[in-house]
Image: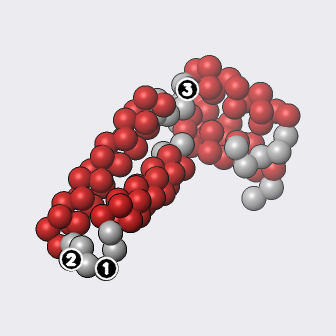
Amino acid sequence: MTTKSRMLKAQTLIRQQRYSEARSILETVDHPKATDWLLRIESIAPAKRRSKAFRYTFATLSIISFLVAAFSGLLLFGDNEGLPDASLLAITFGVALLASYVFRKLNS
């Protein structure tokens, strides 16, 4: 699709008040008018985004759930002969930090 055809398609979608579809097309166009139209769409119908509070709450609950599951698994199925308890705790904590990082990247 050429720039002109994408702009015409976006214009049609804007006239039909299909702002999210128009926004997705305009984000692929490198033209000053596309930027202007995106700003106008944002003022008319802001894009729905999750708040930071929601994302951090989700990540925190995910980490807590993971830690509870990991410690339960260690308590129920750990043999305590291969690694000392402190090492198991450090490994679990490291995996939890990694999970936190991944959740933050996915939810941002």
Quarter of the picture containing the C terminus is top right
- Secondary structure of residue under mark 3: loop
Contact? badges 2 and 3 (CB < 8 Å): no
* Residue closer to the observer: 34 or 55: 55
Q: Position of residue 84 (x, y in %)?
A: 32, 69
List the residue tagged with mark 1: 82
Instruction: Give the distance between the C-alpha atoms of the residues marked 2 and 3, in whole angstroms.
Output: 54 Å
Identify the residue under disc 3.
46
* Distance of label 2 from label 1 (alpha carbons): 7 Å
Quarter containing the N terminus:
bottom right
Q: Residue at x 55, y 38 (%)?
A: 20
Residue sitting nearer the eye, 47 or 82: 82
**In-image side of 98 versus 76 (left or right):** right
- Labels 2 and 3: the sequence-earlier one: 3
Compared to residue 92, the image places residue 105 above or below, namely: above
The answer, for residue 24, to whether it is visible in the render is yes
**Mark 3, other Cα within 10 Å: few <14 / some 14–19 / many ≥20:** few
x then y, percent, for residue 35: 77, 33
15 displayed left or right of 37: left
